[in-house]
């Protein structure tokens, strides 16, 4: 069961893993911005280097996407990555987003609807 988050901006804050050399104050955020008039919610995140490769980002993004689609206003979740950020692209894909387009600077990833979230 996912925790209830008030309407508006949803944030998951995760602490660095001390067992892998992380410091208590070294935290990263995953953010789901409120939907715009088209029902598109923006997704953003950062990962502490010492926590890379442990699945934390994927888990947090899945939770945020699930939370977003629980809001009837959200029709699509959109994220962007730099062309050379292959690790982030893999995380987005594991969280259910697919590349929908690219421009000279960024790749754009999205997911439309969420089958596990009843409305």
Image: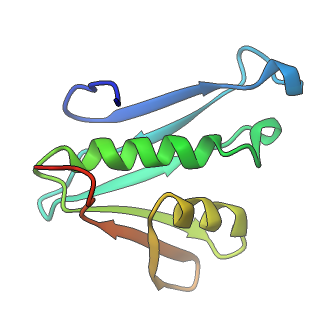
Nearer to us in this view, 102 or 119: 119
Task: From this view, report whether residue 63 is shown above or below residue 86.
Answer: above
Horizontal and vertical percent for residue 66? 33, 46
Tell me if residue 33 can be seen: no
Nearer to us in this view, 80 or 22: 22
**Residue farthest toward the top in the current orientation of the protein:** 24
Horizontal and vertical percent for residue 80? 49, 66
Tell me if residue 56 can be seen: yes
Horizontal and vertical percent for residue 47? 67, 42
- Image-quadrant location for residue 9: top left
Of the 4 image quadrants, the one containing the N terminus is top left
- Image-quadrant location for residue 36: bottom left
Residue under the image location 57 percent in, 85 percent down: 104
Direction from residue 111 to residue 52 in the image, left or right: right
Task: From this view, report whether residue 97 is shown above or below residue 95.
Answer: below
Residue under the image location 82 percent in, 24 percent down: 22
Direction from residue 37 to residue 24 in the image, left or right: right
Direction from residue 58 to residue 96 in the image, left or right: left
Nearer to us in this view, 7 or 93: 93
- Image-quadrant location for residue 8: top left
Residue under the image location 73 percent in, 26 percent down: 16
Residue under the image location 35 percent in, 67 percent down: 111
Task: From this view, report whether residue 47 is shown above or below residue 69.
Answer: above
- How many tags in the picture? 0
Task: From this view, report whether residue 75 is shown above or below residue 108.
Answer: above
Direction from residue 20 to residue 59 in the image, left or right: left
Nearer to us in this view, 54 or 73: 54
């Amino acid at each position: 069961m996912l925790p209830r988050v008030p309407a508006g901006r949803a944030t998951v804050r995760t602490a660095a893993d001390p067992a892998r050399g992380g410091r208590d104050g070294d935290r990263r955020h995953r953010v789901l911005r409120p939907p715009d008039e088209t029902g598109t919610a923006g997704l953003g995140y950062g990962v502490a280097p010492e926590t890379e490769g442990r699945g934390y980002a994927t888990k947090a993004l899945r939770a945020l996407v699930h939370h977003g689609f629980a809001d009837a206003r959200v029709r699509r979740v959109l994220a962007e990555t730099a062309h050379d950020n292959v690790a982030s692209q893999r995380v987005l894909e594991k969280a259910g987003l697919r590349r929908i387009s690219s421009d000279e600077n960024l790749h754009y990833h999205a997911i439309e609807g969420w089958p596990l979230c009843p409305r």
